[in-house]
C-alpha cells in the first residue's frame, strides 16, 4: 500500500486480516495529529502482524504529536506479535513519550534512521527482545552517559545487539562527554 497518497484510514478499514504478517504503508500522507483524523485501534485486527513499515508515511508537520499519537496507536492496536517497526524519514525530532515503544513486547528491530533525533530520549529497556536499533542519518552529535548505560543494559540481555549510528554529525572535541562516548565505543560489546 505504498505511495498511494493515503491520508486517512477509517476504523473498520482493516477487518478480518488475521493472517497478514507484513503491512507496508511507506510514502503516504497519513494524518494522525488529532483523534478526529485517525482511529487509535487502526492496526488492531492484525493479530499476526510481524512487520510494520511506516517509512515516510505521516503528513509533514506532525512530528510534535507524532510520538504520543503513535503510542496510543501501539497500545490500542495491541501489536504483541510485532517484531520489526520501520519509522524512517518521518521528520521525528523528539519522542515526547519515553515509553512510546513499550507496548511492543516482541520488537526485535527498530528503524529510526533518516529522522531529526538528537539523542535517545525513549526507553529501550522495556523492549526485552530488541537486538537491532537503527539511528543512522539523524542529528545526533553525542550520546550522553545515561544513553550509553541504557544501551549497555540492553546489550547485556542478549548475545548480539547492534546499534547503527553512521552519518550523524558527531562532535569531535575535548569535552568530557565526547571523551566518554569515544571511550565507550572502544569498550562496548555493542
Image (cartoon, rainbow, N blue to C red):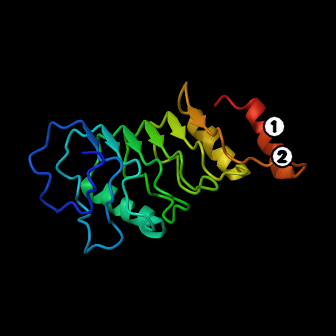
Side (left or right) of 17 relative to 117: left
Name the residue: 25% across, 40% down: 49
Tell me which numbered mark, 2 or 1, is placed earlier along the sequence. Answer: 2
Q: Which residue is mark 1?
A: 183
Where in the figure is residue 126, as x and y percent of width and height? 47, 48
Residue 121: quarter of image: bottom right
What residue is shown with label 2? 172
The residue nearer to you, when weighing 63 against 175, is: 63
Whole-percent x, y for residue 6 in the image = 26, 57
* 188 relative to 79, above or below: above
Residue 159: image location, x then y, percent: 55, 24
| Farthest residue, direction top | 159
Marks 1 and 2: in contact by CB < 8 Å? no
What residue is shown at x 26% (from left), y 66% (from top)? Answer: 38
Q: How many marks do you count on the picture?
A: 2
Can residue 128 be seen?
Answer: no
Question: Is 189 displayed left or right of 135 in the figure?
Answer: right
Of marks 2 and 1, the one in the foreground = 2
Disc 2/disc 1 C-alpha distance (Å): 13 Å
The residue lying toward the viewer, choosing from 129 and 133, is: 133
Tell me the element at label 1.
helix
- Residue 166 image-quadrant placement: top right
Left or right: residue 187 versus residue 18 is right
Name the secondary structure under disc 2.
loop
Q: Among all residues in the image, which is located at the extreme left?
A: 16
Amino acid at each position: 500500500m505504498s505511495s498511494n497518497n493515503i491520508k486517512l484510514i477509517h476504523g473498520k478499514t482493516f477487518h478480518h486480516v488475521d493472517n497478514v504478517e507484513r503491512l507496508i504503508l511507506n510514502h503516504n500522507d497519513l494524518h494522525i495529529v488529532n483523534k478526529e483524523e485517525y482511529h487509535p485501534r487502526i492496526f488492531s485486527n492484525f493479530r499476526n502482524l510481524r512487520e510494520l513499515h511506516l517509512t515516510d508515511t505521516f503528513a509533514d508537520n506532525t512530528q510534535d504529536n507524532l510520538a504520543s499519537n503513535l503510542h496510543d496507536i501501539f497500545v490500542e492496536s495491541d501489536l504483541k506479535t510485532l517484531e520489526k517497526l520501520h519509522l524512517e524519514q518521518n521528520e521525528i525530532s523528539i519522542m515526547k513519550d519515553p515509553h512510546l515503544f513499550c507496548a511492543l513486547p516482541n520488537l526485535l528491530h527498530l528503524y529510526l534512521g533518516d529522522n531529526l533525533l538528537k539523542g535517545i530520549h525513549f526507553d529501550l529497556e522495556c523492549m526485552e527482545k530488541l537486538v537491532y536499533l537503527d539511528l543512522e542519518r539523524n542529528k545526533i552529535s553525542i550520546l550522553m552517559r545515561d544513553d550509553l548505560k541504557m544501551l549497555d543494559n540492553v546489550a547485556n540481555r542478549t548475545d548480539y545487539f547492534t546499534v547503527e549510528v553512521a552519518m550523524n554529525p558527531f562532535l569531535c572535541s575535548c569535552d568530557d562527554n565526547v571523551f566518554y562516548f569515544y571511550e565507550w565505543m572502544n569498550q562496548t560489546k555493542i
